[in-house]
Image (cartoon, helix red, strand yellow):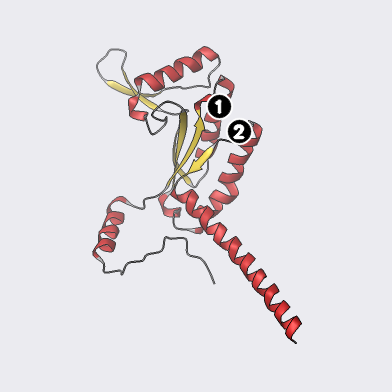
Amino acid sequence: MRFTHSEANLLPDNHPVNQEYRQFLEKFGEEGNLIILGIKNSDLLTYEDFNAWNSLADSIEKYDEVELVLSTSNLPVLKKSDDASKFIIEQLSKAPLTSKEELSAYKTKLFGELPFYRNLIFSEKDSVLRTAIYIKKDIVNSSIRKEFVLEKFNPLIEDYKENHGLSELRVSGMPYIRTLNSQNIVDEISMFLLAALLITSAIFFFLL
């Protein structure tokens, strides 16, 4: 017995919805490759904590399984060139913050002047900051995704939470949810098989 790492298809292959979905995948590639990290803005009140949050995103981006990470450490913004003849793209912050004033200025800029990132990097009421992690599409339906989430991603997140005394760091996204659900199924099957074996053994013991 083995598990598939793709989602169950409940419709026939020739169903119009299936055909449209295959056409979508051929044109745009695999979807459902986004993992989101969320943390309360109130947990990042010091520039040291803010730098640590950015460092976590930078560490995740170094994994081979990750295509792109969008976080407060690398947000691109449009700026005018020195001669005002064109727009150029620069990072909102190019280096770790070194003071409370820099942190305040950064958040003021992000929340007040960059509405494009609202509901992506920060929440509607500025109470939550997020990091968007795009894993490579070719591993979404493979065992590599499971290995990445369970053996690399989760330990890194748990270390960060423990080192900074956080319990409210949230993780979501289809690759993450699918991995945890499949692992729960594997664990439960083992438990049920063991329970069935014990019950069967008890029946034979008392009846024979």
Image coordinates of residue 42 in percent, x first then y, are: 53, 24
Q: In this image, 91 relative to 164: left or right?
A: left
Q: Mark 2 points at which residue?
A: 166
Q: Is residue 173 above or below residue 16?
A: above
Image coordinates of residue 137 in percent, x first then y, are: 41, 51
Sequence-wise first label, 1 or 2: 1
- For the C terminus, which image quadrant? bottom right
Q: Which residue lies furthest to the bottom in this view?
A: 208
**Residue 43 badge:** 1
| Residue plotted at (55% across, 34% down) | 56
| Residue plotted at (33% across, 52% down) | 29
Q: In this image, 20 relative to 9: left or right?
A: left
The one of 95 and 57 positioned closer to us in this rendering: 57
Amino acid at circle 2: Leu
The count of marks equals 2
Task: Kindly state the secondary structure of the residue where label 1 is placed.
Answer: helix
Q: In this image, 92 relative to 145: left or right?
A: left
User: Do the numbered discs 1 and 2 sit on residues whose CB atoms are within 8 Å?
Assistant: yes
Image coordinates of residue 113 in percent, x first then y, are: 35, 19
Residue neighbourhood size for the residue with mark 2, other residues' Cα within 10 Å, grouped as few (<14), some (14–19), many (≥20): few
- For the N terminus, which image quadrant? bottom right
**Residue 197 badge:** none
Residue 195 figure quarter: bottom right
Amino acid at circle 1: Asp
Mark pair 1, 2: CA separation: 8 Å
| Residue plotted at (59% across, 22% down) | 48
Residue neighbourhood size for the residue with mark 1, other residues' Cα within 10 Å, grouped as few (<14), some (14–19), many (≥20): some
